[in-house]
Amino acid sequence: MHLTGQRILITRATSQADSFKLALEAAGAQPILIPVIEIKEPSSWEPFDKALAQLSEYDWVIFASTNAVRSFIERMDKTKVPKENLSNIKIGAIGEATAAILQEHSITVDFSPDKFVAENFIEQFPESDNMHDLKILWPRTNVGRTLIADEFTASGAIVDTIEAYRTDLPDSKDALATRLFDLCNEKNLDLVTFASSQTVKNFHQLLKQGLVNYAGSKGYIVNHESDALEAAASNLLNGIAIATIGPVTAKTARQYYKTVQIEADTHTMDGLLKAIERYYEI
């Protein structure tokens, strides 16, 4: 097994990490789960419920993640909005997993790009030549890129973005920060995996907090905004490889850590696993 003995950190939310953890174990690795992100309910359901009540007004609903699909379906069920209300609306999905969960709920996917990034969605969107007054609903998280909405709006579409869920730091962030620092400082990791840009940002924030915690335990006071803290946090990953699910996540990781050793060709967790296995074959 190519990954025998490799200590691989999973940074995904606990609710999404099981299958990847099992796959790593099957390949011989020693997965370590430190969820640097937590999926939470929207700050308010009111805009979401209003959009569900007016579904018939939309031409498209776009889903960019499995979390958005789950939240959408669960809220439809809770507010007793029948799935049949989607029958005359076209559905767009970014990613195999996103499309798959829609199909599991018997919702037809009308368009999915050949690569699972926003740029490809925009370039290949079937109605890109006639966007004027096209009405689009985009249930999404509270953070992250708004490229699709921005580009479609600039092309004349009416895009309603609603918060379907929040991605936040875990409630146990202080303890996680200390554990992350210890693992990286003592080089008890061989590889860190990132499945989104937000996990990179949260990881770095926690790593800096771990440094501050450590300095405080030694009697030092650290400026949270100092360049020295940024550099020290980045240097903690020296000698530890980084694996990312795709180009957008890789770009974010390079902003903090300069070098990304592994970037998945297929932007799924299976694609990430295959890329990791190829890396350790060399």
Image (spheres, grey):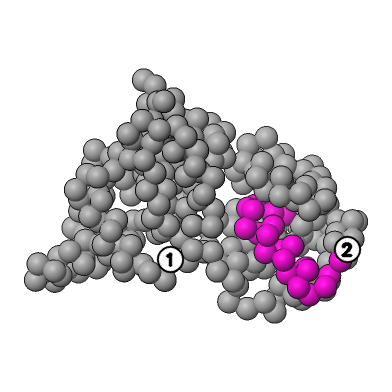
Mark 1: which amino acid?
A: Leu
Q: Of 85 and 19, which appears nearest the observer?
A: 19
Residue 28, position in %: x, y?
Answer: 40, 33
Q: Secondary structure at mark 2?
A: helix
- Measuring from the top left, give residue 182's x and y in whole percent: 22, 55
The span shown in magenta is: 62-82
| Residue 204 visible here | yes
Where the C terminus falls, by quadrant? top left
Identify the residue at image location x=15%, y=70%: 216
Q: Is residue 245 visible?
A: no
Is 194 positioned to the left or the right of 228 in the image? right
Residue at the image position 54 percent from the left and 45 percent from the top: 19
On whether residue 165 falls in the magenta region, the answer is no
What is the distance, in whole Å, between disc 1 and disc 2 at their CAs? 35 Å
Query: Which of the 4 image quadrants contains residue 128?
Result: top right
Q: Amino acid at mark 2?
A: Asn
Q: Position of residue 20 (x, y in %)?
A: 50, 43
The residue sitting at 62% across, 41% down in the picture is: 116
Q: Residues within 10 Å of mark 2 (few under 14, many from 20)?
A: some
Q: Residue furthest top?
A: 282
| Residue 15 as seen in the image, left or right of residue 150 | left
Question: Looking at the image, is mark 1 or mark 2 earlier in the sequence?
Answer: 2
Indicate the quadrant where residue 67 lies.
bottom right
Is 260 placed above or below 205 here?
above
- The crowd level at tag 1 (other Cα within 10 Å; few <14, some 14-19, many 20+) is many
Residue that numbered label 2 is attached to: 85
Q: Please say if 95 is above or below 222.
A: above
- Please name the residue that numbered disc 1 is placed on: 169
Return the residue nearer the eye: 200 or 159: 200
